[in-house]
Amino acid sequence: MEILSSYNLIIASSIILILSFFFGEVSKKTNIPSVLMLIFLGIILKISLDAMHLGEEFDFFPILEVLGIIGLIMIVLEAALELELKREKYIPIAKAFFIALIGLLLSIWVAALILHEFIPDMSMKSAWLYATPLSILSSAIIIPSVTGLREDKKEFHIYESTFSDILGIMVFYYLTGQIETAGHAAEHSGGLASFMGNIVLTIVISLVASYVIVLVFQNIKSHVKLFLLIAVLLLLYALGKKMHLSSLIIILVFGLLMTNMKLFFRGFLQKWLDYKQAYHIYEGLHVVTMETAFVVRTFFFVVFGMTISLASLVSVNVALVSLLIILSIYAIRFVTLRLFIGKDILPQLFVAPRGLITVLLFYAIPKEAEVATFDAGILLFIIIGTSLIMTFAMIWDKQRTGKAIRKASDNPVGYKKWKAPSLEDVKED
């Protein structure tokens, strides 16, 4: 069909990327997440295709799945390449880890109770599995959105969202494994031990692979080695999945090793590292990762927007379940932030959007655990709701900060030239 010719698809893809760039600029000025704009762009495209009777000809799920996996890898790698493991950052990193872990587990538990109560035919096991994607923070939305925050708050969100991604995915696949082995008592009883062993094995493999990659690639003289490196990482991730490992840890460990080479290459390992060459790889990889994450994230959320059904948003049950889950998210977040951070929890309290991983894991729920009565509109409602709440919070924080700066500018601190006291002044005293 002429309208779907190769040149028209190239034109459409180029326009989408250009629009995505401008959405990013608008996001910096307004704090409206560019992801929301991309989703709405996808909805508009879907309406346009339906009007031309072309919408039914496409199966977007395979595209969405591939884009989601690559996007997830790029986003985690991008975040890991910014995590410097300095002594003064150990406490902030530890805080972010425990806030992410406690918030994730409590959110899953409460969301599972809500789903079990309000969704017909939803067993508690399935409820836990469905609740997990809904409880994971979206680093794809958070990281680009917090660039204007104070440095310590920005770092907190980068650490927290990255940990939430990784921990959430690990919990999801642990629960998936429990459902798949249900009925086998021996396997089920050793599930947690097997899971912890899987994590330890993955970390060991990740460290070995990361050292080998750095030592090999620092000696490659070709100028086209960065995408070769990304291809190796994608291969390791996919092979890890085939071996039922927590593959995202491989990406995280590699990123941390690249960012903190002097920390990892100590003692006898130091002589094997060509720091200048390795750092050159790090700089190039950082740029390529950001650019690739931008492209993949753009098309993922546009395609996601093309797959959603707006009709589900008008369902009373969908709205009720979604609102209860959203309320639980912020109630739990308030308690954990007050416990670990104190009173200065704005706008962090409201920076808890759901996004790419939520969608990706939802579509990864195994067939035997699927519940036909679960409406995917809950997914969309929570993604849009949490993103809008974050938007309003970021706009409010920006206005508050601007007001404080203007007030300080209008009332500058005065000064008076100091004068040494005279003998007469001393006598008077």
Image (spheres, rainbow, N blue to C red):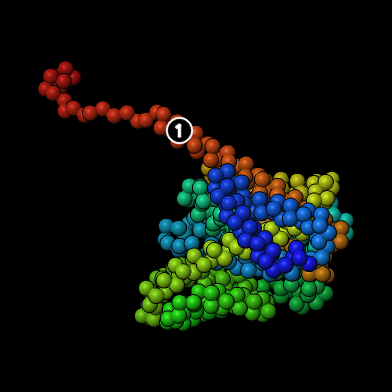
Specify whether residue 322 is in view.
Answer: yes
Q: Quadrant of residue 19?
A: bottom right
Q: Is residue 154 above or below residue 411?
A: below
| Residue at the image position 44 percent from the left and 67 percent from the top | 283
Residue situated in front as seen by the camera: 344 or 258: 258
> Circle 1 is placed at which residue position?
406
Q: How many marks?
A: 1
SS for tag 1? Answer: helix
* Kind of residue at disc 1: Arg
Residue 109 in the image: state x and y as whole percent. Answer: 73, 56
Residue 183 in the image: state x and y as whole percent. Answer: 83, 74
| Residue at the image position 51 percent from the left and 47 percent from the top | 149
Lateral position of residue 93 relative to residue 47, left or right? left
Q: Quadrant of residue 178?
A: bottom right
Q: Is residue 257 above or below residue 41?
A: below
| Residue at the image position 53 percent from the left and 63 percent from the top | 290
Residue 173 in the image: state x and y as whole percent. Answer: 70, 69
